Image (cartoon, rainbow, N blue to C red):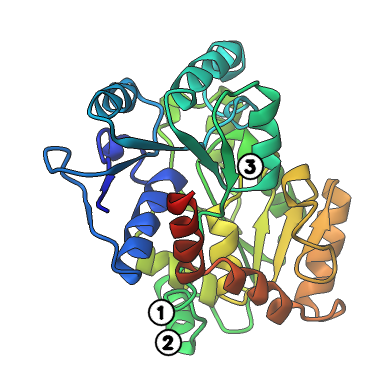
Amino acid sequence: MKVLLYSGSLKIVNKSGIGQAVRQQEKSLKLLGIPYTMDSRDDFDIIHLNTIFPDSRIMSIMAKRKSKKVIYYAHSTMEDFKNSFRGSNLLAPIFKKWIIYCYNSADIVITPTEYSKMLLESYGLKRPIFSLSNGVDIDYFERNYDARKRFRDKYDLKEQEKVIISVGHYIERKGILDFVKIAEQMPEYQFYWFGYTNSHLVPHSVREIIENSLPNLHFPGYVNRNDLRDAYCGSDLFLFLTHEETEGIVLLEALASKIPVLIRDIPVYKDWLSDGETVYKGITIYDFKEKITQILEGILPDITKSGYRIAEQRDLKVIGRLLINIYDQ
């Protein structure tokens, strides 16, 4: 059995969660010794498709003609397409029809959570849908002091300064507007947002806040994986205010780094992340501000060990074995 990890158009999404998902699929296959290729000219038995660009749809058609098995990873839904880029809400119904067309071209569809599986089933997809986490490399994101020191030194942060980070595109869906509001109202803490989106692709309201002049709010842009690991280890809280996700790889990375995590209470996290047990949750700006203070000042208990166990259950070695089971089916 040989797997083709199709990398066409990957450069477009290389700095997104989809790009990271492809890299993690590659590592899972390596860890389990499953032969794979990223060269579409090679022979293969199964093809993994991760994007919904036209070239992936063409590859699906070509693979089927050669009697190959097609797996489509459903990272995208209409719900998480909304409130992302300029015009996304207007295009959302068309986007939904397109992804249904793409996903129905597969033999099976894999999506990261039971929540995203439920959404796809509501679309009336005709293919079997499996729920399988994107996973996380827990060894790579292991918390260590040297990484913390590198982060603090790079951004000239004193040890006693409390640092709150988030990671994602500059899009409204990711909660960037609320992140900025909270930073503005909590000047005693330092806020860092890691990630980047071309300003021409986002609404004026988002462009405006990125160009802010708040002394405690920083937008370092996109950073490489090593620097992001240092940021997890060097900060004091991961604040994930996203309004909609299919899973959220950066959340798993934060849990693996044993950093306190505060998230928006949204349906995707209802069944596997418990408020006050593995993460903390909030709904309103007031909720978030109150819990930020309580977490950073040590009023709320440290639950990072419980959060880490969630990451352990989704380690790439575990996900790889579950993927083999899906291959067998």
Q: Are marks 1 and 3 in contact (CB under 8 Å)?
A: no
Q: Nearer the viewer, mark 1 or mark 3?
A: 3
Which numbered disc covers residue 245?
3
Q: How far from the left and from the top, in percent, is residue 221?
A: 42, 50
Nearer the N terminus, badge 3 or badge 2? 2
**Residue furthest out toward the left:** 41
Considering only vertical position in the picture, is 107 above or below 218?
Answer: above
Mark 1, secondary structure of its residue? helix
Q: Quadrant location of residue 67?
A: top left
Q: Residue at x 41, y 27 (%)?
A: 52
Residue count near mark 2 (Cα–Cα under 10 Å), binned few <14, some 14–19, many ≥20:
few
Q: Which one is earlier in the sequence, the residue at label 1 or at label 3?
A: 1
Relative to 144, 113 lies left or right: right
The secondary structure type at the circle numbered 2 is helix
Can you tell which mark lies on residue 150?
1
Q: Amino acid at mark 2?
A: Asp
Task: Give left or right: position of 72 versus 206.
Answer: left
Q: Position of residue 185 (x, y in %)?
A: 77, 53
The answer to whether residue 40 is visible is yes
* Type of amino acid under label 1: Arg
Q: Residues within 10 Å of mark 3 (few under 14, many from 20)?
A: many
Disc 1 from disc 3: Cα separation:
30 Å
Question: Which three-letter amino acid code belongs to the residue tagged 3?
Answer: Glu
- Element class at badge 3: loop
Q: Position of residue 319 (x, y in %)?
A: 50, 62
Q: How far apart are the alpha carbons under marks 3 and 2?
A: 32 Å
Binning the other alpha carbons within 10 Å of mark 1 as few (below 14), some (14 to 19) or many (20 upward) gives some
Q: Residue at x 76, y 70 (%)?
A: 278
In the rendered image, is residue 244 in sight? no
Q: Which residue is mark 2?
A: 146
